[in-house]
Amino acid sequence: MNLEPVPQLLVFGVFVGALYGVAAVGLALVFGVMRVLNVAHGELLMIGGYASFWLFTLWRVDPFVSLLATAPILFVMGLALNGGLFSHVVRLDEETKIKNSLLIGFGLALILQNLAIQLWTADERSVTAAYSGLGLQLFGIVFPYTRLGGLAAALLGIFALHVFLQRTYVGKSIRATAEDWEAAELAGVSVRSVYLITFALGSALAGVAGTLVSVGFTIAPSIGLTWTIKALVVVVLAGLGNVFGVFAAGVLLGVAEALSVLAIGPAYREVVGLALFLVVLLLRPQGLFGAR
Amino acid sequence: MLRPLLLLLGLAVAALVPFMTQRTDALNLLFLLLLYITLGQSWNIVGGFVGQTNLGHAAFFGTGALVARGLWTSGVAFPLAFLAGGVAAAAAGIVVGLPTFRLRGAYFAIGTLAVGEGLRITIGNVFPLITTLPVALIATYDLSARYYLALGLAVATTLAAYLLLRSRVSLGMLAIREDEEAAQATGVNPLRHKLAALIISSFFAGLAGSTFAFHQVGYYPSAPFSPIWTFDALLVTFIGGAGSLAGPILGAAFYTVIREVLAVNLVQVHQVIFGTLFIIVVLALPGGLVDAWARVERRFRPAGRR
């Protein structure tokens, strides 16, 4: 086996994995706090990607600057979706809640995907900024600027979320609700508003991931499910309870997929991610970084 | 709930349909409806009886289609290929079930979804070319044969679910659905019951796949692995009412007919309307059509009569 491309593959694996991480953190937040499985997470990501695409195409807004718009747009969308749909299922018992949220998420995914087709056609799009295609070259490894920017934005977003959850009053009440919502409610936390904010935050993170996907990767109305599943796999790999753990699991999956292309060929790339997933589940059902 | 006379009448009508109409669109729609009954009924065995939300149902449907199509087009007699599809899917059920049944609740759902998707993408990579029926088979293509196969399979699957529900094993399955720890404490082996349910479920899902392979003239081998089949099976079951025998039948009828009506009348936006309608059904009728009907019946039943 020729090992020459390994460092380059590793680097690209990290870049892709960081994206998996951001996509998964939003989902993990919603799932961990509300116990709601939002299978339309990837569709929210897709909408974030389109927001950046149109901001760039119509007004030449730099994709990384457009994060300042996509995150708030998706935050507001999350508020509306929680108020209109998911707030109706959060009070059900756990099993029913998961099933009903699945079904609602599926209906929502269907709606968003087909609206996107109607509004923006089924074409594949991506943002091509002036610096796309350019990159740093270090030790014979290429670091494209768009991917570096994506990694930086991802790390910044994860770090901001961590600080928010650890340091602010709202963040602390979110964590308290995740641990025991009844106790949190008795202690004076408004669980209703916590759920609302959590869902909106999760959606905003999907928007951020969508922007990062639109730079250097492609967006289309149909990409939602693929990203939802990647995010779900990462969430299970990581286990709940730790923002950085989710991010690390994303990077791990990205690297494992990238290296497997070399080891057994691109046709079986998904099998490696899957095998990793099943092995982790068998050995550590609580996830790699999960607390139990 | 299942009234025998009404059921026999319905079956008789269903058996006569190909004599009453030659319209291929009507027969194809009914074929799909029957296929959805099988998919829903088989999903219900794991999802409704044992209460495990299996999101990898398409993997078994796809496996059945892949094996049956492969054998059939390479010269094996169809009945044999048909059965082989079911057996292969049941074997896949064991392979998938052993690791994923270690997971509980939402984690099981996510695990099976990931397994199904991984399989779909891999099949798409390994078999990238469309599979088309050989000319000789197209020349003798008979839609009513497909219709009867789907009808027979839907009846067989419903019967299997009925017999399962009447058996002793199902008590263990229902107990696991209600409370796994309590079931285990009373001597029910959860893994064995879950696996048994999944083997039956995947066997019939595989046969549905064989039927799909028998019906379609040309398709991508990865198409029957699409998660759409899983979600359709799940939707059909939940719209009708999970855990009941009538649920998947009612759900399949409601689902296919509404979707067809919307598709014909609102070509551009029918998926959007359908999604909206679907969410309304989930929010308004959490127990499905069977449950809603039972509530209506209770309200209008004269006092003192049962």
Image (cartoon, coloured by chain):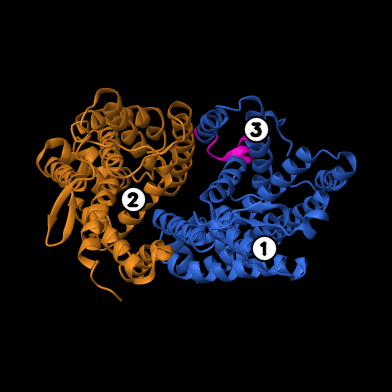
Is A47 left, or right, of A242 in this rendering? right
Q: Residues within 10 Å of mark 2 (few under 14, many from 20)?
A: many
Residue B110 image-quadrant placement: bottom left
The single residue placed furthest to the top in the displayed view is A59
C-alpha separation, residue under disc 3 versus residue under disc 2: 32 Å
> Which tag is nearer the camera, tag 1 or tag 3?
1
Parent chain of label 2: A
Numbered range of the magenta stretch: B283-293
Q: Are marks 2 and 1 on the same chain?
A: no
- Residue A104 coordinates in the image, percent (x, y): 46, 38
Q: Nearer the viewer, residue A148 or A184?
A: A148
Chain coloured orange here: A
- Residue B113 coordinates in the image, percent (x, y): 45, 55
What secondary structure characterizes most of the magenta part? helix
Dot 1 corresponds to which residue? Answer: B69
Q: Nearer the viewer, residue A1 or A156?
A: A1
C-alpha separation, residue under disc 1 versus residue under disc 3: 30 Å
Vertical position of residue A81 compared to residue B224: above or below: above
Dot 2 corresponds to which residue? Answer: A231
